[in-house]
Image (cartoon, rainbow, N blue to C red):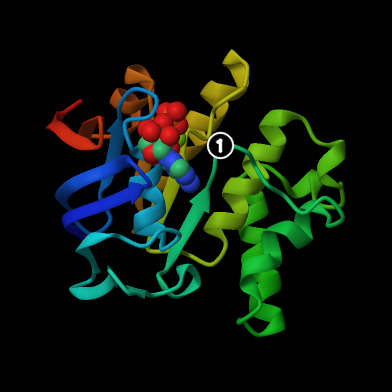
């Protein structure tokens, strides 16, 4: 469970997130919708542990992980991130990019998990390519595979379909749907696209000017 309690994050005179509270049930899927600048990415970064709140607190599984002066670091939160840009390591192959988060596993297990995730994201045949040799859609799948590999409790995705053409978008959406349906992984999906939100998430939080303005079924 993820719980935000009156969380505020300011950047100089901008209140990016203004006293936001909500609770996300374990393994649930929620979309965060809202116009540009409404605070969606900042909420996601607060959940990830990439931003520190100025006020309020954030709990994961009942434990306080963020409050002013305390931020449990991202890698200790059981979260996988997929950002707007795939941000792959350019000098590493697809397989090494995806295996990056598996360093804590014994080698045989890491190899097995890697093979499983590559198959799930249809990347097995591309495993030895470098990021520069991939299409935009393929690079997004690598970013998704990398996030999924360590079996995170939550996947945090920030407009992961930006700059993809129609066909790659629907492929990627179908893949995300399939991953979420068949697992215990929760998903927080940030978008400004109503149809993506409606397709993926039974629950939608709407943001405007740093507030959650509306909460409901998509
Ligand atoms: N690092 C930062 N420094 C200064 N201001 C910031 C920073 N990050 C975000 N902001 C400001 O906080 C507000 C919320 O930004 P945020 O990126 O969360 O919006 P968003 O809803 O994700 O927008 P978009 O849909 O364009 O991605 C904006 O006014 C933005 O300019
Ligand atoms: Mg954003």
Q: Is residue 17 left or right of residue 109?
A: left
Quadrant for residue 165, please give it: top right
Q: Position of residue 51 (x, y in %)?
A: 41, 58
- Locate the N terminus and report the quarter of the image it occupies: bottom left
* Nearer to us in this view, 201 or 178: 201
Residue farthest to the top, as pictured: 166
| Total numbered circles | 1
Q: Secondary structure at mark 1?
A: loop
| Residue beneath disc 1 | 84
Q: Position of residue 146 (x, y in %)?
A: 62, 56
Q: Is residue 111 left or right of residue 177?
A: right
- Locate the C terminus and report the quarter of the image it occupies: top left
Q: Is residue 111 left or right of residue 30?
A: right
Q: Position of residue 6 (x, y in %)?
A: 14, 54
Q: Identify the residue at image location x=37%, y=63%.
A: 153
Quadrant for residue 101, please give it: bottom right
Can you say whether 64 is above or below 43 in the image? Answer: below
Can you say whether 168 is above or below 30 in the image? Answer: above
Q: Identify the residue at image location x=66%, y=70%.
A: 112
Q: Identify the residue at image location x=48%, y=33%.
A: 159
* Label 1 crowd bin: few (<14), some (14–19), many (20+), radius 10 Å: some
Can you say whether 62 is above or below 96 in the image? Answer: below
Asked whether residue 135 appears in the rendered view, the answer is yes
Mark 1 close to ligand 2, CB under 8 Å: yes
């Amino acid at each position: 469970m993820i719980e935000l309690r009156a969380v505020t994050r300011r950047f100089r005179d901008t209140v990016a997130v203004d006293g936001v509270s909500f609770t996300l049930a374990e393994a649930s899927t929620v979309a965060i919708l809202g116009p540009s600048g409404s605070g969606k990415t900042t909420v996601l970064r607060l959940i990830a542990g990439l931003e520190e709140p100025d006020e309020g607190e954030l709990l994961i599984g009942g434990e306080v992980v963020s409050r002013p002066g305390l931020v449990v670091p991202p890698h200790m939160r059981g979260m996988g991130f997929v950002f707007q840009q795939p941000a792959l390591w350019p000098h590493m192959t697809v397989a090494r990019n995806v295996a990056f988060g598996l360093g804590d596993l014994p080698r045989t297990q890491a190899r097995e998990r890697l093979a499983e995730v590559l198959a799930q994201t249809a990347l097995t045949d591309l495993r030895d390519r470098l990021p520069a040799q991939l299409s935009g859609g393929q690079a997004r799948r690598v970013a998704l595979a990398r996030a999924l590999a360590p079996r995170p409790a939550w996947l945090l995705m920030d407009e992961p379909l930006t700059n993809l053409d129609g066909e790659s978008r629907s492929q990627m959406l179908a893949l995300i749907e399939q991953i979420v349906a068949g697992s215990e992984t929760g998903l927080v999906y940030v978008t400004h696209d109503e149809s993506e939100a409606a397709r993926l998430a039974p629950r939608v939080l709407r943001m405007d000017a740093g507030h959650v303005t509306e909460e409901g079924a998509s």
